[in-house]
Image (cartoon, rainbow, N blue to C red):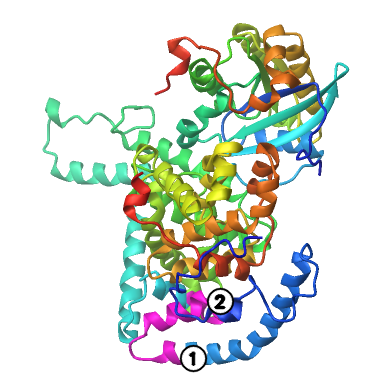
C-alpha cells in the first residue's frame, strides 16, 4: 500500500491528531511480521484503533452535544469532530445542515429560518408543479371578466394553450417536456439503492421517500434549466435525503422534503459544474477537475502517475468521472459513503477540495496492485473499487499534498 | 472472477461498444453476458468496462466491452469510446417506442460521426422481450431498421437470458469474418490496441465536435 510515499508535511486540516489513525508507516511491535502480510498488520492496528476509539467516541459525543447546545454553534469545532469520524448518527442531520449552511450558527435563528424556508419551498412547488388545465382555467377566468361584450379583436385571440399546440411557448408543450423529465427521474429513482428498503417502493415509507426525492430533483431541474436533470443527481441526493429523513426530531423529519431540497441546492452549488455539458471543456467543468486529479497524483506519487497515465493509458475519465460527479456514492457501501461525506462536508476548504484528496488517496491506497497491473486489470480495479476502511482512506487523504495553481496550469 | 492481469493467451482482442438510450438494459445485457446474472443496476454514469474471455469459432478471444451511459448529457464524453471499436451494439427497449426511434435520430448518427472503423460491425438488439404484453416495437420493424442500416439483428432478454449469448456470438463471428478487423485484433498487435492509432482516417471521422 501507499505508505512512505507521501510526505507528512500537510497537517490534518481538522486539527485532529493523526497519530490516532497512524495505520501506515512503521509501528512498534510490527517488525517481526512478514512484509507481505499487509492486510493482517492493518487489521490489527485497526482493532487497536477501535478500542481506543470507544473512549474517545464518548468524549467526542459529549463535546458535540455541548457544542450544539451553545447559543452560537462553533462551526470549527463541529468540523473537527465530524471530520475525524466521531459524529454520532443522532446528531448528523443537524450537523450536516449546519455544515451546509442551511442552519445558521445562531441557534435562536433556527426556528425562523426553517419556517421561512419551508414556506418558500411550498410556494415554489405550487408555482412549478403546475397542472396546465388548472392554469388555463385561471387565465380564462381573468380574461372573461375583462372581456367586453362583442367580438374579440385579433390580438385578443390567444395562440391557444391546448394540448395539441406544440409551439415552444405553449404551457402544454412545457408540460409534456416536464413529463419526460419526471419519467426519467422516476426510472432512475427505481434504480437508486434498490438493495436498501428505505429507498424502494415496497413500503409506504419507501414510496413516500421516492415521491419526495422525485419532487426535489424535478424542482432542481426546473430551477436550473441550463443543466436540467442529469442522471447521477439521484445518487447524490440519496445520502442527503436519508440523513434528513432519519432526523429524530419529528417536525424535521416531516419537513424533510423542503429541508432536503435546500441542502441539496447548497451541496450542488459546489459540484453542479460537473453535471453541465456546456462546461465540459472548460477548467470549471469535469475535464478540468479530472486534470486537477491527475496533477494531484503526479505531485504526490510520480511513479504511480507515470504508470497509470503514460504506460497503461488509464485515463481518469474512465474511472474518476463517476467518483467525482457522484461524490463517491457508487464506489462504497452506503454506510461508508455517509462516513466519507462527514469528511467532505466538514472540510473548511470545501467539498471538492476534500473529494479530490480522497480520489487521489484511493489511487495511492491500491498503488501496489496498480503498479503490477495493466490497462485491463487496472481499469477493472478502479471501476470496482474494493470496500476499504473509510478511516484508512481518509487518513491517507489528509496527507495528500495539495498543488498550487501554477502546477495545475502546466 | 476471471483475472486478466497475467499474460492471457488469446488469439484476438476485440473492442466492443454498447450504446442506446438510458434504461434500455445495456448494463444488464452486459452483466448477463459476463457473469450470467441479473440485478437491479444503478444508471451507468460515464462508462463501464468489462472483459470476457470466450472461445468462438474455434478461436480464443478476449472481448473488451465498453458500456456507455445513455443519457444525452454524457454523449460528448462517450464519443471518444467509439474509436477503434470493432463491434458496436445498439440496444433499444421493445416496450418503449422512443428508444427505437432514437436509433435513427441519434445513435446511427453518433456512429457515423465517431466510429473510426469503416468496417466496424454493427448489431441491433431489441431488449426486454420478456415483457411481451408491453411490446410496442414489432420484430419486423427491428428487422427493417437493421436492413436499412446494414446491421445484424436479434431480440433478447437480459432478464431471462434468451438470446443474450447469441448477440455477442453473432457479432464476434461477423468480426472474425472480416479480414481488416481481424488484422486489428490479432494478438500480435494486442499491446497497442488501447493506444489505437486510427489508421489514417479521413477528415470526416477524425474530427469531432
Q: Position of residue A24 (x, y in %)?
A: 64, 70
Q: Which residue is drawn at 30% across and 79% down?
A: A112
Query: What's the magenta region?
Result: A66-93
Mark sitting earlier along the chain (2/1): 1
Specify the quadrant that holds the C terminus of chain A: top left
The structure residue drawn at horizontal position 41% and vertical position 36%, both measured from the top left corner, is A177
Q: Where is residue A193 in the image (x, y as percent from the top left)?
A: 64, 55
Image marks 2 and 1: residues in contact by CB distance under 8 Å: no
Assess whether residue A82 is covered by the magenta stretch: yes
Mark drawn on residue A63? 1
Secondary structure of the residue carrying tag 2 is loop
Alpha carbon distance from label 2 to label 1: 14 Å
Is the residue A124 above or below the residue A132 in the image? below
Name the image quarter holding residue B25: top right
Chain bearing tag 1 is A
Most foreground residue, A196 or A275? A275
Query: Label 2, on which residue?
Result: A85
Q: In this view, does A322 lie above or below A64?
A: above
Q: Can residue B162 be seen at all in this image of the molecule?
A: no
Instruction: Please indicate whether residue A172 sits to the left or right of residue B171 in the image.
Output: left
Instruction: State the image quarter where residue A353 is shown.
Output: bottom left
At 25% from the left and 43% from the top, the residue drawn is A139
Q: How many labels does the image show?
A: 2
* Residue A209, numbered label: none
Q: Which is more toward the observer, B109 or A18? A: A18
Q: Residue sitting at 31 percent across and 86 percent down?
A: A108
Farthest-out residue, right: B58
Is there one chain holding both mark 2 and mark 1? yes
- Image x and y of residue A41, in percent: 75, 71
Amino acid at each position: 500500500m501507499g505508505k512512505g510515499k507521501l510526505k507528512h508535511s500537510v497537517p490534518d486540516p481538522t486539527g485532529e491528531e493523526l497519530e490516532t489513525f497512524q495505520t501506515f508507516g512503521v509501528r512498534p511491535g510490527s517488525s517481526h511480521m512478514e512484509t507481505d502480510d499487509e492486510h493482517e498488520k492493518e487489521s490489527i492496528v485497526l482493532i487497536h484503533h477501535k478500542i481506543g476509539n470507544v473512549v474517545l467516541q464518548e468524549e467526542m459525543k459529549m463535546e458535540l452535544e455541548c457544542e450544539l447546545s451553545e447559543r452560537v454553534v462553533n462551526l470549527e469545532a463541529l468540523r473537527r469532530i465530524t471530520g475525524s469520524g466521531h459524529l454520532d448518527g443522532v446528531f448528523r442531520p443537524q450537523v450536516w445542515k449546519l455544515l451546509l449552511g442551511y442552519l445558521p450558527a445562531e441557534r435562536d435563528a433556527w426556528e425562523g429560518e426553517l419556517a421561512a424556508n419551508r414556506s418558500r419551498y411550498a410556494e415554489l412547488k405550487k408555482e412549478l408543479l403546475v397542472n396546465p388545465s388548472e392554469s388555463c382555467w385561471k387565465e380564462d377566468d381573468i380574461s372573461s371578466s375583462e372581456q367586453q361584450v362583442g367580438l374579440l379583436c385579433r390580438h385578443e385571440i390567444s395562440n391557444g394553450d391546448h394540448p395539441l399546440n406544440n409551439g415552444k411557448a405553449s404551457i402544454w408543450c412545457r408540460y409534456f417536456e416536464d413529463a419526460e423529465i419526471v419519467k426519467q427521474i422516476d426510472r432512475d429513482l427505481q434504480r437508486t439503492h434498490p438493495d436498501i428498503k428505505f429507498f424502494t417502493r415496497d413500503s409506504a415509507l419507501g414510496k413516500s421517500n421516492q415521491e419526495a426525492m422525485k419532487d426535489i430533483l424535478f424542482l432542481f431541474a426546473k430551477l436550473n434549466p441550463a443543466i436540467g436533470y442529469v442522471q447521477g443527481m439521484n445518487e447524490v441526493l440519496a445520502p442527503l435525503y436519508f440523513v434528513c429523513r432519519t432526523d429524530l426530531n419529528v417536525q424535521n423529519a416531516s419537513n424533510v422534503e423542503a429541508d432536503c431540497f435546500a441542502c441539496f441546492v447548497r451541496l450542488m452549488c459546489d459540484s453542479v459544474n460537473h453535471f453541465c455539458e456546456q462546461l465540459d471543456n472548460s477548467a470549471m467543468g469535469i475535464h478540468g477537475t479530472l486534470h486537477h486529479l491527475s496533477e494531484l497524483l503526479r505531485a504526490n506519487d510520480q511513479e504511480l502517475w507515470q504508470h497509470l497515465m503514460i504506460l497503461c493509458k488509464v485515463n481518469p475519465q474512465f474511472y474518476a468521472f463517476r467518483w467525482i460527479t457522484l461524490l463517491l456514492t457508487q464506489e462504497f457501501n452506503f454506510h461508508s459513503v455517509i462516513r466519507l461525506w462527514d469528511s467532505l462536508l466538514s472540510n473548511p476548504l470545501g467539498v471538492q477540495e476534500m473529494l479530490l484528496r480522497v480520489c487521489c488517496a484511493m489511487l495511492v491506497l491500491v498503488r501496489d496492485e496498480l503498479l503490477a497491473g495493466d490497462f485491463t486489470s487496472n481499469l477493472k480495479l478502479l471501476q470496482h473499487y474494493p470496500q476499504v476502511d473509510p478511516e484508512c482512506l481518509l487518513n491517507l487523504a489528509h496527507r495528500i499534498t495539495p498543488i498550487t495553481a501554477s502546477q495545475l496550469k502546466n | 472472477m476471471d483475472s486478466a492481469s497475467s499474460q492471457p493467451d488469446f488469439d484476438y482482442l476485440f473492442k466492443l461498444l454498447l450504446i442506446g438510450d438510458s434504461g434500455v438494459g445495456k448494463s444488464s445485457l452486459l452483466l448477463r453476458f459476463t457473469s450470467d446474472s441479473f440485478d437491479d443496476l444503478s444508471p451507468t454514469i460515464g462508462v463501464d468496462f468489462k472483459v470476457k474471455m470466450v472461445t468462438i469459432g474455434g478461436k480464443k478471444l478476449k472481448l473488451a466491452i465498453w458500456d456507455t451511459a445513455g443519457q444525452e448529457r454524457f454523449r460528448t464524453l462517450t464519443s471518444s469510446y467509439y474509436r477503434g471499436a470493432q463491434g458496436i451494439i445498439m440496444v433499444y427497449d421493445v416496450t418503449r417506442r422512443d428508444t427505437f426511434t432514437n436509433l435513427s435520430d441519434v445513435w446511427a448518427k453518433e456512429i457515423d460521426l465517431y466510429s473510426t472503423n469503416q468496417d466496424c460491425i454493427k448489431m441491433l438488439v431489441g431488449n426486454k422481450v420478456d415483457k411481451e404484453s408491453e411490446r410496442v416495437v414489432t420484430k419486423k420493424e427491428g428487422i427493417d431498421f437493421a436492413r436499412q442500416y446494414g446491421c445484424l439483428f436479434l431480440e433478447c432478454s437480459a432478464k431471462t437470458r434468451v438470446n443474450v449469448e447469441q448477440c455477442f456470438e453473432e457479432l464476434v463471428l461477423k468480426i472474425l469474418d472480416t479480414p481488416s478487423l481481424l488484422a486489428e485484433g490479432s494478438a500480435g498487435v494486442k499491446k497497442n490496441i488501447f493506444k489505437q492509432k486510427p489508421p489514417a482516417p479521413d477528415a470526416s471521422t477524425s474530427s469531432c465536435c
